[in-house]
Image (cartoon, grey):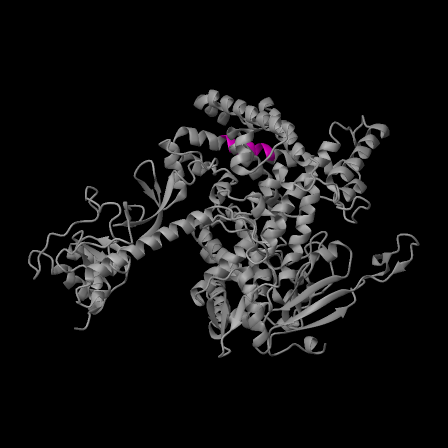
């Protein structure tokens, strides 16, 4: 007999007397109308398959040919199968966790941690006493999916007893026996094998929880072997260590925590992280109060010579926040394990503290308790009072208890850095925590290229803290300053740099510098595995197991342009097809040199025919955005149509979001995220623009290697040419949309992007300047829909570069051009002789992506 379509979509569960949807692997309501609604709405089932499913459900009704009283899975009082029973065929089986002190089942480790705390069934996750014995890994099933799930434990090795011959599991086993009388023996054998496999799997899971002993190069990564993580954390519980090193939960998550003790513990950790956040901000003020020569020594790892660039703040605040988060996690880790005692922390975590460090950590606990108690005593009335005081935030900064906490945190960090070490580097608590950061959530080791970011954070913040430590209480750069006191502090700094912050000092800094040096070169030494491979047909690319065809890749690029053009057509009142014909790219005049703040091709008088500004779009769509009303004095005035204005600005945001990946994809071989996200359409006071119109195409010139420009070496720029379609849209965006956007925000009163970021292309009022994460999100949305693989900026870069090696027309040529010199006053002079000499060369890398090459490009 041939199976019907319904046999693969719905079935009857004999054990529970329920209908099971095989598509979503969950039980459903038995009424035929409910079955029809489920398959029609959830699975978009129509036609003959839907009729077969409905007929299957109707067959169990009182008027059907096999009437049965089926149960409703939404009934909260329904009896679930007993724990340890065989899996129900058709229901999804999950890997879950069970509390061994009671029958609490969940798939989420955080939910179990909440239960352990609330029911006091835990042995402290950070202590590890309940990490292995207090919970068990089990297999679960549920009639319904979250958030309505009710789990029970299933035993894959068990089989259902025969209840009438309609059980698939029992039938299959009987069929395997061949009817020769050995069915019972086969069943016992299968049960034994399944039970053995389960025990082996549980043993493997338990083994993977613990850090294995070092086993040499054949069983251990060279990176892990060099860092000695396995030797240091041998036999420790990796999930327990990972959980102990996490940042505290956010305030929103904290509100849902229960019981109160767990919520208060998280509040204390958040107070601790806030305390450390204040410290780098305070210490960074010292950067403006010491000589540049001191900062050059501060940035040096060599005890004998300074670096050429003074140490300073990072360009992006996100980077400094990420670096600060490393120290915050270190402090939270220490506070979490402090209740174990000094010996207990050493036994369970392998961390060691000196007497001075341990006493300083105890001071932090005491100060945290003081701050927490003060908050609790204030109560709700004080909170309401604070909200009415306009300058309360300023008063909180002067809170003596918080100031004392900040001072204690600062002292503990300094004591963590100032420790002399021999061969046993992990006897320092800070270095021990770097090993904790080497553990991923799944128990595997963090790769070198990721772990060095943590190390960089400890170094950067550590330098800030140590600078303040050396110059503490010194009145340098003040009216009370004297040369004697200032130079005494500088001498302390010079000696401290040699003793604590340089290579060969046998300190935590020296060890971290050594690890970073090895980690940065590790990938080059190891080589690595290929991420992209071509199929034998030459038309399909395999990237990390996902197949990407050349056709789908090209269609994705075209879809990006179509989407952006669709939004631009809306913004121009449906007239983009006519307007684009009026843009003569070859007639647009532009200069490749720095002209001055606000200058671009849109401000060039030779391009007056383009009519840049807000007037063009005002003529096209102004009537839909404004209306003329009676002013009441015989005249008239303009009034904004608020709803239409908000809708138009929403279209503009959508166009900008669509144009963002268009520039990245159609600009040729893709750069890194910051190259696209920092594009400027006009000059600023200090930096030139990145967008030019040259020889009939829009050119994007970005830094290829920013560090070379900062170090004063040969400048390298990448010139990317947009094709005609994206070039026309870019011209319209800069010449008309950006000026029109400013007018809309001014006249409507709707908040727009800050005036300070006007020169940048990619921005919004909510987020400010867009970053790589925004570009990755947009790329992932489009590539996921078109290709079936969500590519971020990093992954798209790998795919596009490999595609460019195969597709004709994607080639790169390098041309060295001398930097333009406007006049003799701009020539660089020798600092010793005063003689003018030639500017360093700027290397332009022409990125050609089209088959129809430009005359300028092909000439080179």
**At which x and y percent is residue 273?**
56, 35
Q: What stretch is highlighted in magenta?
A: 268-276
Q: Can residue 91 be seen in this view?
A: yes
Q: Residue, x 20% and y 68% (percent of image)?
A: 178
Residue nearest the observer in this picture, 435 or 225: 225
Q: Residue, x 50% and y 37% (percent of image)?
A: 248
747 to the left or right of 420: left
**At which x and y percent is residue 17?**
16, 53
Relative to 726, residue 319 above or below: above
**At which x and y percent is residue 11?**
20, 60
Q: Report the magenta stretch's main SS.
A: helix
Residue sitting farthest toward the top: 377
Q: Split into 4 quadrants, where in the image is the N terminus? A: bottom left
Residue nearest the observer in this picture, 626 or 511: 511
Q: Split into 4 quadrants, where in the image is the C terminus? A: bottom right
Relative to 711, residue 570 above or below: below
Residue nearest the observer in this picture, 533 or 39: 533
How many badges with numbers are in the image?
Answer: 0
Residue sitting farthest toward the right: 833
Q: Can residue 313 be seen in this view?
A: no
**At which x and y percent is residue 828?**
85, 57
Residue nearest the observer in this picture, 408 or 360: 360
178 to the left or right of 253: left
Quadrant of the rendered structure where residue 334 is?
top right
Relative to 474, residue 241 above or below: below
Q: Is residue 477 magenta?
A: no
Quadrant of the rendered structure where residue 261 is?
top left
């Amino acid at each position: 007999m041939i199976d019907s379509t319904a046999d693969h979509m719905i079935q009857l569960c004999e054990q529970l007397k329920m209908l099971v949807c095989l598509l979503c692997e969950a039980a459903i309501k038995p009424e035929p109308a409910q079955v029809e609604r489920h398959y029609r709405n959830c699975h978009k089932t129509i036609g003959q398959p839907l009729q077969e499913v409905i007929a299957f459900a109707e067959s169990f009704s009182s008027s059907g040919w096999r009437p049965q009283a089926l149960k409703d899975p939404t009934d909260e009082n329904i009896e679930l199968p007993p724990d340890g029973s065989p899996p129900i065929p058709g229901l999804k089986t999950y890997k879950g966790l069970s509390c061994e002190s009671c029958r609490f089942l969940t798939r989420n480790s955080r939910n179990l941690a909440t239960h352990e705390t609330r029911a006091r069934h835990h042995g402290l996750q950070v202590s590890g006493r309940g990490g292995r014995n207090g919970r068990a890994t089990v297999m679960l099933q549920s009639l319904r999916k979250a958030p309505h799930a009710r789990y029970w434990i299933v035993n894959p090795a068990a089989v259902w007893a025969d209840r009438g011959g309609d059980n698939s599991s029992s039938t299959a086993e009987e069929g395997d026996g061949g009817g020769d009388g050995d069915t019972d023996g086969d069943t016992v054998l299968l049960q034994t094998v399944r039970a053995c496999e389960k025990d082996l799997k549980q043993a493997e899971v338990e083994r993977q929880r613990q850090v294995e002993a070092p086993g040499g190069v054949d069983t251990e990564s060279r990176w892990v072997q060099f860092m000695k993580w396995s030797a240091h954390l041998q036999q420790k519980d990796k999930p327990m260590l990972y959980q102990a090193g996490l940042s505290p939960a956010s305030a929103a998550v904290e509100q849902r925590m229960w019981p109160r003790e767990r919520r208060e513990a998280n509040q204390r950790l958040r107070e601790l992280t806030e305390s450390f956040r204040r410290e780098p901000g305070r210490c960074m003020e010292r950067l403006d109060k010491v000589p540049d020569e001191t900062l050059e020594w501060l940035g040096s790892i060599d005890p004998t010579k300074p670096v050429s660039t003074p140490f300073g703040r990072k360009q992006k605040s996100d980077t400094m926040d990420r670096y600060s988060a490393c120290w915050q996690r270190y402090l939270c880790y220490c506070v979490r394990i402090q209740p174990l005692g000094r010996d207990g922390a050493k036994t369970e975590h392998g961390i060691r503290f000196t007497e001075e460090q341990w006493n300083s950590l105890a001071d932090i606990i005491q100060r945290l308790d003081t701050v927490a108690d003060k908050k609790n005593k204030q109560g709700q009335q004080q909170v309401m009072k604070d909200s009415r005081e306009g300058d309360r935030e300023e008063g909180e900064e002067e809170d003596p208890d918080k100031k004392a906490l900040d001072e204690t945190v600062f002292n503990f960090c300094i004591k963590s850095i100032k420790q002399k070490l021999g061969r046993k580097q992990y006897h320092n608590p800070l270095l021990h925590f770097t090993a904790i950061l080497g553990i991923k959530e799944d128990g595997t080791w963090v790769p070198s290229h990721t772990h060095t970011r943590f190390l960089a954070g400890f170094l950067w913040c550590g330098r800030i803290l140590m600078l303040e430590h050396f110059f503490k209480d010194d009145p340098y750069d003040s009216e009370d300053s004297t040369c004697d006191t200032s130079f005494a502090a500088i001498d302390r700094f010079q000696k401290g740099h040699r003793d604590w912050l340089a290579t060969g000092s046998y300190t935590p800094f020296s060890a971290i510098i050594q690890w970073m040096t090895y980690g940065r070169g590790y990938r080059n030494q190891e080589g690595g595995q290929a991420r992209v491979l071509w199929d034998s047909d030459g038309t399909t690319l395999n990237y990390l197991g996902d197949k990407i065809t050349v056709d789908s890749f090209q269609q994705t690029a075209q879809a990006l342009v179509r989407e952006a053009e669709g939004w631009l057509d809306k913004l121009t009142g449906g007239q983009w097809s006519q307007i684009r014909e009026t843009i003569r790219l070859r007639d647009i005049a532009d200069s490749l040199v720095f002209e001055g703040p606000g200058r671009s091709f849109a401000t060039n008088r030779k391009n007056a025919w383009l009519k840049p500004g807000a007037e063009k779009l005002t003529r096209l769509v102004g009537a839909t955005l404004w209306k003329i009303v009676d002013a009441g004095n015989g005249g008239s005035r303009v009034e904004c149509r608020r709803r239409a204005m908000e809708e138009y600005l929403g279209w503009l945001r959508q166009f900008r979001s669509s144009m963002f990946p268009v520039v990245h994809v159609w600009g040729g071989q893709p750069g890194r995220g910051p190259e696209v996200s920092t594009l400027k359409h006009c000059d600023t006071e200090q930096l030139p623009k990145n967008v030019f119109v040259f020889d009939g195409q829009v050119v994007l010139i970005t830094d290829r290697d920013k560090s070379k420009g900062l170090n004063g070496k040969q400048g390298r720029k990448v010139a990317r040419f947009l094709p005609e379609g994206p070039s026309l849209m870019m011209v319209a965006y800069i010449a008309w949309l950006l000026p029109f956007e400013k007018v809309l925000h001014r006249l409507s009163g709707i908040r727009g992007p800050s005036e300070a970021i006007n020169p940048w292309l990619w921005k919004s009022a909510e987020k400010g300047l867009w970053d790589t994460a925004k570009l990755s999100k947009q790329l992932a949305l489009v590539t996921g829909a078109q290709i079936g693989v969500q590519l971020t900026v990093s992954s798209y870069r790998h795919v596009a570069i490999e595609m460019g090696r195969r597709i004709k027309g994607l080639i790169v040529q390098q041309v060295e051009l001398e930097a333009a010199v406007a006049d003799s006053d701009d020539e660089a002079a020798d600092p010793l002789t005063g003689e003018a000499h030639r500017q360093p060369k700027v290397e332009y890398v022409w990125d050609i992506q089209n088959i129809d090459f430009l005359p300028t490009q092909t000439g080179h």
